[in-house]
Image (spheres, grey):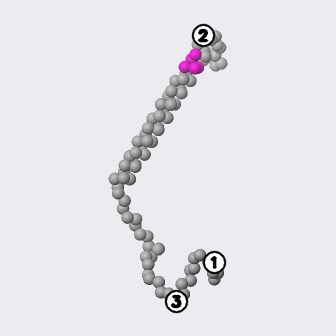
């Protein structure tokens, strides 16, 4: 072994105490449920607010586009590209 090694795995003839078995899962200790429930509620409210804002922004954009398109075609003499009149009838 090198003298410069930081972690020496060899312990010689030293007897180590038996520790916790790392292959048996230990359940985590329960935390305070009130704090985690509060975070869930806050995140849900924030998500709802963001979805509402997105819906409002899309609605405003659609209204602005409709007004822009209505203003561009108002009073203009245009010919429709597709005739909805049945030529055989």
Split into 4 quadrants, where in the image is the C terminus? top right
As drawn, 32 above or below 64: below
Labels 1 and 3: the sequence-earlier one: 1
Q: Secondary structure at mark 1?
A: loop
Whether the residues at callouts 1 and 3 have beta carbons within 8 Å, the answer is: no
As drawn, 18 above or below 48: below
Q: Residues within 10 Å of mark 3 (few under 14, many from 20)?
A: few
What mark, if any, has residue 13 been given in the picture? Answer: 3
Magenta segment: 67-71
34 and 56: which is toward the camera: 34
Q: Residues within 10 Å of mark 2 (few under 14, many from 20)?
A: few
Q: Secondary structure at mark 2?
A: loop
Residue at the disc numbered 2: 75
Labels 1 and 2: the sequence-earlier one: 1
As drawn, 54 above or below 5: above
Q: Nearer the viewer, mark 1 or mark 2?
A: 1
Please identify the quarter of the rendering in which residue 10 is found.
bottom right
75 and 83: which is toward the camera: 75
Residue 51 position, x and y percent, is: 47, 37
Tell me if 82 is positioned left or right of 25 in this view. right
Tell me if 83 is positioned left or right of 53 in this view. right
Please identify the quarter of the rendering in which residue 85 is found.
top right
Residue at the disc numbered 1: 4
């Amino acid at each position: 072994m090198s003298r410069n090694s930081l972690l020496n795995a060899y312990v010689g003839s030293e007897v180590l105490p038996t520790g916790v078995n790392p292959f048996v899962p230990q359940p985590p200790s329960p935390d305070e449920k009130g704090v985690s429930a509060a975070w869930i509620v806050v995140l849900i409210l924030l998500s709802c607010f963001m979805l509402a804002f997105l819906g409002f922004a899309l609605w405003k954009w659609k209204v602005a586009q409709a007004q822009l398109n209505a203003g561009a075609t108002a009073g203009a003499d245009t010919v429709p590209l597709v005739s909805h009149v049945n030529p055989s009838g």
